Image (cartoon, grey):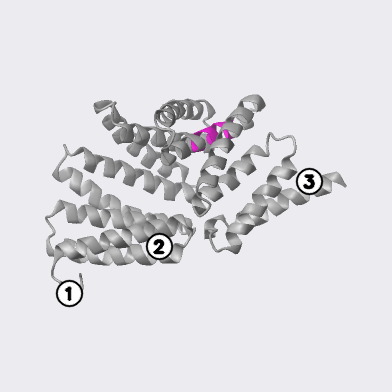
């Protein structure tokens, strides 16, 4: 239909939506080449539409979203620098739109997400000060939105995620006490949302991530009972999600990470790490292991080799 009516913005917009949906599914399945191709096609059309009508905020916002999706794929490929470029382009548009309409809460949320995405890319590069600054910008917007409408669950979720992101960098910088406080604040929101709708997989995954991070922090402090409780709860959620959709490569690798974490406190860590390695190898064999996650195979083999050496 778009070919039949090449000047129809309506037809072209529909086509970009289709590309986005294909890209989202491909990315979830670990098919990153297909995902990037779909997102780039969507961006190409949206740039044309935005260029034809530069004062249209919806068309500009659509370009920002496409840049963000491309950034997500580049991160999975292990290209943090490329992701940062894409996220920065998305952020520039989001900032401009908020300047134009500072009272639009949806645009503010877009900006908060852009700040968080940039923080993710900087975090990948281990640029802790810049990552923390970006995460704090995201948190400030998310906190403002959540305070303005406490009943809005999506904004509460954004606040929880931003608190978890800030905590992660604080932990990396050695600020354990402030990191733990942020993790606990994040956990309180994530736990409430997960109980509110047990069928919401996004909220369940959020909860598992925060529990995992708390477990790691407790392990560093040698609080093994607390870390075991957190790791077990996180593992239980990730096992359930992985079973619910075996084709979701992201959830499958989440389970790998949960096994690795749980091995710190498990009675038989070798058995747990073996499960992690077998699942990672299966993802790699089927072409669903993201490039940035491929070093996990060598890492797990190294850990298992150490256990074998100790046994001898």
Residue corresponding to mark 3:
307
What percent of the width, then of the height, locates residue 116?
37, 43
Residue 34: x %, y % from top left: 42, 66
Q: Residues within 10 Å of mark 1 (few under 14, many from 20)?
A: few
Q: Nearer the viewer, residue 238 or 173?
A: 238
Q: x, y percentage for residue 10?
A: 16, 62
Whether pointer 3 and pointer 1 mark residues with C-beta atoms closer than 8 Å, the reply is no
Crowding at dot 2, Cα within 10 Å, few <14 / some 14-19 / many 20+, comes out as many
Q: Residue at x 72, y 40 (%)?
A: 269
Q: Which residue is mark 2?
A: 35
Toward which corner of the image does residue 20 lie, by quadrant? Answer: bottom left
Quick check: 310 above or below 174? below
Q: Is residue 58 left or right of residue 196?
A: left
Q: Which mark is residue 45?
A: none
Q: Vertical placement of 91 versus 163: above or below?
A: below
The location of residue 99, given as percent across then percent down, is 17, 44
């Amino acid at each position: 239909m778009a070919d039949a009516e090449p000047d129809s913005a309506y037809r072209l917009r529909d086509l970009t939506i289709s590309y986005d949906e294909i890209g989202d599914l491909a990315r979830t399945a670990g098919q990153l080449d297909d995902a990037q191709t779909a997102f780039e096609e969507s961006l190409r059309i949206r740039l044309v539409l935005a260029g034809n009508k530069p004062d249209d905020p919806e068309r500009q916002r659509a370009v920002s979203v496409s840049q963000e999706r491309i950034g997500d794929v580049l991160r999975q490929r292990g290209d943090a620098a490329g992701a940062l470029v894409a996220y920065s382009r998305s952020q520039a548009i989001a900032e401009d739109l908020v300047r134009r309409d500072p009272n639009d809460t949806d645009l503010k949320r877009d900006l908060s997400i852009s700040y968080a995405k940039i923080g993710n890319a900087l975090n990948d590069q281990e640029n802790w000060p810049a990552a923390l600054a970006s995460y704090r910008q995201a948190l400030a917007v998310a906190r403002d939105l959540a305070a303005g409408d406490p009943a809005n669950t999506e904004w509460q979720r954004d606040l929880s995620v931003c608190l978890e992101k800030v905590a992660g960098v604080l932990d990396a910088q050695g600020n354990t006490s402030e990191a733990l406080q942020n993790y606990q604040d994040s956990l309180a929101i994530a736990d409430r949302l997960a109980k509110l709708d047990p069928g919401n997989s996004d909220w369940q995954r959020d909860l598992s991530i925060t529990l995992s991070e708390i477990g790691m922090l407790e392990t560093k402090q040698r609080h093994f009972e607390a870390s075991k409780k957190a790791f077990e709860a996180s593992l239980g959620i990730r096992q359930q999600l992985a079973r619910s959709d075996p084709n979701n490569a992201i959830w499958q690798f989440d389970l790998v990470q949960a096994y690795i974490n749980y091995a710190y406190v498990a009675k038989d860590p070798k058995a747990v790490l073996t499960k992690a390695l077998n699942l990672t190898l299966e993802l790699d064999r089927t072409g669903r292991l993201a490039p940035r996650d491929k070093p996990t195979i060598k890492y797990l083999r190294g850990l298992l080799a150490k256990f074998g050496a100790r046994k001898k």
